[in-house]
Amino acid sequence: MSEPAIPEVTWTRKDLLGIADLSSEEIELILDTAEAFQAIAQRPIKKVPTLRGKTVLNLFFEPSTRTRSSFELAEKRLSADALNFSGSGSALSKGESLLDTARNLEAMAPDLVIIRHQHPGVPHLLADRLDSGVINAGDGAHEHPTQALLDAFTIRQHKKRLAGLKVTIVGDIEHSRVVRSNIHLLVKMGARVTVAGPRTMMPVAIEKLGVQVSYDFDEALTDADVVMMLRVQLERHGRSLFPSTREYFQVFGLTQARLARAKADAIVMHPGPMNRGVEIASAVADGETSVILEQVANGVAVRMAVLYLLSLAQQGKS
Ligand code: CP
């Protein structure tokens, strides 16, 4: 096994808690590093010894398919030792606090902790108290930084740039951690972001984050380079925010006919999981312009890059 041709880099940030904290230079560095790691996925043997002897804890208190499995795959490909922990079946059900749980797990000396939690700010709480590097894998409706990074990586692959692109993000803006991280990233990198969705799912004053707001899907789609659809997050709605899924699809569902308003070479993205027939038609989700499965594949390389860079900060402390 040989090391990938990764750039000589300096990285001192202990944790990755959100895109809001990152500079455009740090974002660029993560994306460039991910490109180096992506080459590994093309090899017959997809494994390097970069994190041999390092231990990574995967703490998932909310369901996940893509994020959890791609972090686990990234850890395996970097030769790290991974310990998987989920809330159900743990001593949390006997009343142990999250912090005590984390301290006990830290006593096993992990180098990095990945956490997904339903409450915003839990990764920040752990990062304040633990010596290990902490990576936010999604905290409530707050941030999902590695999703935004893999989205940017995918856009860059197709469009060769982020600056100047029109990116239209559509759907349940209010409850989406993906949109918050994407807005922070895309605005920092010079893209023009439009968010569209029903008024009942639009956060107050979101334009203060530097985006255009539209309640007209067709208008928002016009001349878009990238169309990012978001899942309607029924589990986070305290009450009904639209009359029916049928009506939602009629007004905010992405169909081939609607997509014709975007640029001819526009790409269609979705972080998953998708509600087919609610926010996106199957013909679009599985169509030629869809890069949805590329996003999933790119998630492994981006998470390898993040794990590698944060491990450099851990080495710096020893
Ligand atoms: N995009 C995303 O976070 O998917 P999972 O919930 O499956 O991890």
Image (spheres, grey):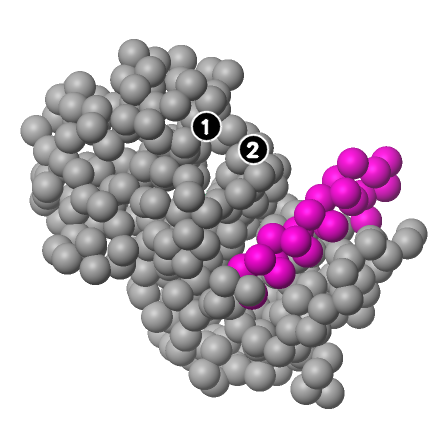
Front in this rendered view, residue 11 or 142: 11
Answer left or right for 120 relative to 242: right
Does residue 270 sit above or below 266 in this rendering?
A: below
Real-space Cα separation, disc 2 to disc 1, in angstroms? 8 Å
Q: Which residue is mark 2?
A: 158
Chain part drawn in magenta: 26-47
Q: Quadrant of residue 308?
A: bottom right
Q: Position of residue 297 (x, y in %)?
A: 61, 37
The amino acid sitting under disc 2 is His
- Asked whether the beta carbons under mark 2 and mark 1 sit within 8 Å of each other, the answer is yes
Q: Quadrant of residue 185?
A: bottom left
Q: Position of residue 300 (x, y in %)?
A: 63, 46
Q: Which residue is mark 1?
A: 267
Q: Where's the C terminus, which quadrant? A: bottom right
For mark 2, give the secondary structure: helix
Q: Residue at x 15, y 30 (%)?
A: 216
The amino acid sitting under disc 1 is Ile
Total count of labels: 2
Task: Note whether ligand 1 is within 8 Å of mark 2.
Answer: no
Look at the image and say whether residue 34 sits in the magenta stretch. Answer: yes
Answer left or right for 213 relative to 126: left
Look at the image and say whether residue 277 sits in the magenta stretch. Answer: no
Q: Is residue 92 visible?
A: no
